[in-house]
Amino acid sequence: MKTESNQAQERDWASLPPDVLNLIAKLLNEITHFVRFRAVCPLWRSSTPDTDLAQQFPWILDNRKDPHDPNLNFYSVPFNKIYTIHVPRSINKTFSGHSDQYMFTLSQHHQAVSLLNPLNNHDIPLPAYQLVGSPHWIGPQQTKMGEYVVCYGHSGRQSPKLVFCHPGQNNWQELELSSDYTDCHHFYLRGMLFSIERTTGATKVTNVADGTLAYVIPPVEGHFGNCAEYLVEDSRGDILRVPRYNPRFINGFDVYRLDVATKSGLPCWVKVNNIGNQALFMDRDGGFALRASHLSGIKENCIYFLKTIFIRVHIEPSYGVERIDIETGAREHLPCPLKEPVSWFVPSLRHLSAQ
């Protein structure tokens, strides 16, 4: 006679209904658990498509010293784990920004550009273009990968040039900018180029389609010319401006929302101390917003800033993540064991098409 224990051991887990498997998969909030779950058997894999993966807390990409090394190291803050991913298509490439869970890559001599997902080794080659100088990726950085945009030539006296293409195009389009755009922070959102002047703090908004100036947003009160700037489209569709001040190695942030429906009819930046149920992720080169309710281990209305922390002058810096409460300004240091972290990356198994 079979006991209840024997019946449990003989149960065929592979025969679970697909809808039950689907519900279980959506509860797995770490990507490695999700991958192992799908690897159990063909039925479990077919019942849990890549889109069932829950939104992941962004990983931190470590700097790779050897460009010939196919392995990339990532660190997960909430799970305190380092993941080493074998990515053959990353060989001889450097990373410069991110877009919709893909990383924007440049070949060693800037002769080839592509979008690469390190988790599935899927590479989307972009049209060939001989980039001059040191290009800077300013394209969509989180959700809308409708255009691939690169800005370069904005150092020294050379006027910047914007090159962009749409998925499926075989060539880049060029937009020449005047010398008035040289000393600016450039960002690309919703088909518009936002250029924040370093000296005045005013924001020129240019229509990329025809190069015409759409409008100018006045500077924010108390603008400091030596601050870094971030422009982010948040999860609610608002455009946020986040200047970062750096007096004596102490980083401070302000957050402003673009208001285009003012009584005067002129767009302006409005300071805010609450961005609701979302968080901002910033690093040296850019930033993006994610809904806090969709992530495990995240605190809402916070900025997660990947930074270099100097303990004392002339001492080797340590690296980490600083979490800043936007409303109170309270700070918390979250350690990072990587030797030289360079950027955030949103892990995903999505397989996008270039068309």
Image: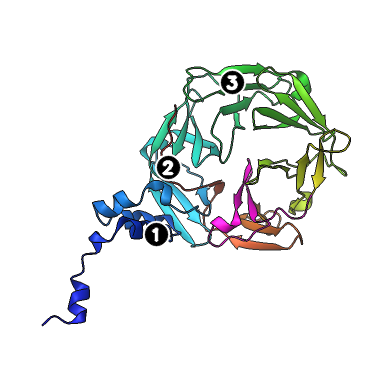
The mark that comes first in sequence, 1 or 3, is 1
Q: Nearer the viewer, mark 1 or mark 2?
A: 1
Determine the image quadrant of residue 82: bottom left
Determine the image quadrant of residue 6: bottom left
Mark 2 highlights which residue? 350
The one nearer the camera, 61 or 247, is: 61
> In this rendering, is residue 72 above or below 115?
below
Residue range of the region highlighted in magenta in the rendering: 272-301
Mark linked to residue 9: none
Q: CA distance from mark 1 to mark 2?
A: 19 Å
Is residue 280 magenta-colored?
yes
Q: CA distance from mark 1 to mark 3?
A: 50 Å
Q: What is the secondary structure assignment of the residue under circle 3?
A: loop
Is residue 269 magenta-colored?
no
Quarter of the image with the C terminus in it: top left
Q: What is the secondary structure assignment of the residue under circle 2?
A: loop
Mark 1 highlights which residue? 23
Let me know if residue 91 appears in the view: no
- Residue at 47% over, 48% down: 347
The one nearer the camera, 110 or 311, is: 110
Mark 3 is on which residue type? Val
- Residue at 49% over, 39% down: 102
- Crowd band around label 1 with a 10 angstrom C-alpha radius: few (<14), some (14–19), many (20+): few
Mark 3 highlights which residue? 132
Q: What is the secondary structure assignment of the residue under circle 1?
A: helix
